[in-house]
Amino acid sequence: MAPFEHAIETLEYARMREIISAYAESTLGRGLAGELAPCTDGDELRRMHAETRELTELLGSTRLPLAGLSDVCSGLEDDDSGGRPLEPEHLYRVVDLLRSGLGVREAFTADAQRYPALFSLAEGVEDLPGLREEIPKVIDLHDGVRSEASQKLSDLRREITSLQEKLRLGATALLKRPDLRKCFQSEGVTLKNDRYLLPVKAEYRSWMKGPVRDRSQSGSTLYIEPEQIVQQGDSLLTLLDSERDEVLRILWDLTRKVRDERVVLRRLQKALAWVDFTAAKASYAAAFGLISPGISDEGVLDLRQARHPYLMWLSRDAGRDFREIDLDSIHARVVPLDLHLGDPAGLLIVTGPNTGGKTVALKTVGLNVLLALSGVPVSAASASIPVYTDLFVDIGDEQSIEQNLSTFSGHLRQLVEILRGATGKSLILLDELGSGTDPLEGAALGTAILDYFRTNEWKAIITTHLGSMKKYAFLHEGVENAAMEFDTESLKPTYRLLMGVPGNSNALAIARRLGVSEEVIVAAEEEISRVEEPTRELISRMEKSSRSVEKERRRAESVRLEVQQDKAEYSRKLAEIDIRRDFLEQEADLEIDRVMRQAREALKPIVDKLKNVPQTHKPMVDELATEVELLLIGTPLGRKREEFARSLRKGDEVRVPKLRGRGKVRKINKSERVLTVVLDGIPTEVGFDDISWIEDSEG
């Protein structure tokens, strides 16, 4: 049996193909959805999930031109001999394919950093601009070959139209002649096989000269082509034949051009089929709030808040469009599970009551694993899926009337397949191990199977009713218990999986609720107390403790999420404060610089006047002028400008705001704090304070 084959037959996988197919826009995408299958290449799986994840996001704001795409490559291998050219509708579908490819490529390459997987996918979406532009010039989607396709065709159609009008008018004129009106069956001209005919009553045949081209079924009406227009009618047929020949020539010309590009078209069609298939997975994921799982090479299976995908589909509101899903309603109906397998425990033994959800739990794990290994998002809050090479499943009643197998024999038959084909990279799901036979022998066989799995380091999830199997995990490393939770107050299963604890079957509690005699129940309880009370008490305490731990874990998870949200909000506000602080600092620097420059401009005339004071006071005036300059240089922007100016070299480019231009430095005089800048070819001397490195600086 091929890998995954039995699991695919058992786990509603075919139904998931149908669901995903419903989200495809074209027959190309639906075809690939119908071929959905697991893959065992980790890199390929990660690529598929990345494409689906990115496309899920992209489709939130972009619609891809994929609707109506179909196979255009069939028939392109034929040659001209004995065949027919491609029909106009087929040729136009080639245009649709090319236009879709162009639209997809533009959408996928618009943001390569945000959508790297889609950017890579776009490399396989080719284009043929020549065909894409030529075919619509020649072909009209509704009218076929355009008259403008060739001069000859244009001339022929003009002649045909003119002659058809003459024939129609000639036939109508005869129809309206008073002397002939009595012989006509109706008042309309009939067009048959491109001939303009008059409906003549059979008894008046002699009144109308011309060949009979047709007759009614009863024979009472003859369709006669009047002899006055027969010659023109023959000319019309000749023109129509010429038109058909020219149309055929044009279609053959386009057909050969399309066939010459069939290799590229085949690649493009395959690429767009993949895009539509991926878009179908993305739309399905968006509708049901699915996630792309992590694909692990470490052999650890981890599922958080996982739900059965097909049960989610069945739980949707059937009255709504399947693209509009009420997730809250679905989540309320389908109970999630948390499960961890592979480190430290490779075997998980699940116990609990009948109808408690054990089988559904196995199917939930199995179907999500199959979908993850097929590149399909899974129904979980988070998931890490190993690259299993096979999934072995023995779930439900395997008896077969045709093969004369009992339930126990059916389970053994599947077990034989597992023992023959499983490896350390397989996942095994066994339902009700050891059931269907004597409990003692079933327990012995079940224990032996667990020993074999453990020795070979196989990964397996096993459900069972047998009490002795519940003790196995306590006695062996690498094995863990889990239980389907049972509400002892309502006497109903909750369908929640509790990791780390074995479960009671609760058979007596259920029997009491269903009305079994109290005398029988008491006798049974006494027998159990005599044989297994210590074990049952231990299990009961552990189950109660596990429920408490699970409740605390959920509360802690809720608190953790709140803390994460608070932390993210704090980080966002802190970033806003940093941006605001930088902005205010820059504003303050600019304001200080502006005020100081205004002060210098106001003081400059006064300082210039003071330079005329007696020589004895001149040192004081020079000191005052120096202090004014130092104050300006000492502002934050002043210091930056000074450092910038003194770092310049000949040939460097600077901006001179007050002259509204840029120029290259020709000469620098650092002692005088001036430099010569060439602006528009003219050397201009400016001060250090008049240059800037900031494009929008005020100076």
Image (tube, helix red, strand yellow):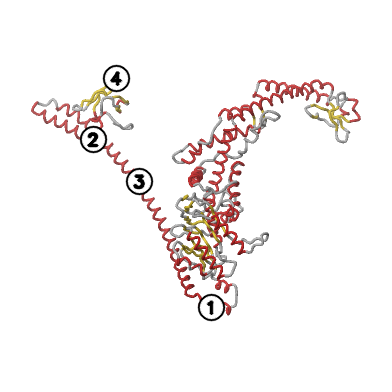
Give the mark nearer the N terminus: 4 vs 2. 2
Compared with residue 588, is residue 4 higher up or lower down, i.e. above or below?
A: below
- The amino acid sitting under disc 4 is Ile
Quarter occupied by the C terminus: top left
Residue 429, image x, y percentages: 54, 58
User: Disc 1 versus disc 3: distance between alpha carbons?
Assistant: 69 Å
Q: Is residue 286 visible?
A: no
Give the mark nearer the N terminus: 4 vs 3. 3
User: Disc 4 versus disc 1: distance between alpha carbons?
Assistant: 113 Å
What element does badge 3 sit on? helix
Give the mark nearer the N terminus: 4 vs 1. 1
Residue 358, image x, y percentages: 54, 62
What label sits on residue 639 in the rendered view? 2
Q: Write down the residue under mark 4.
A: 682
- The amino acid sitting under disc 1 is Glu
Crowd rating for badge 2 (residues with CA inside 10 Å; few <14, some 14–19, many 20+): some
Q: Is residue 284 visible?
A: yes
Q: Write down the residue under mark 1.
A: 527
Q: Write down the residue under mark 3.
A: 575
Marks 1/3 in contact by CB < 8 Å: the verdict is no
Query: Quick one: 317 or 508, which is closer to the camera?
Result: 508
- The amino acid sitting under disc 2 is Arg
Residue 421, image x, y percentages: 55, 55
Residue 363, image x, y percentages: 55, 57
Asked whether, in this view, residue 279 is left or right of residue 234, the answer is left
Crowd rating for badge 3 (residues with CA inside 10 Å; few <14, some 14–19, many 20+): few
What element does badge 1 sit on? helix
What element does badge 2 sit on? helix
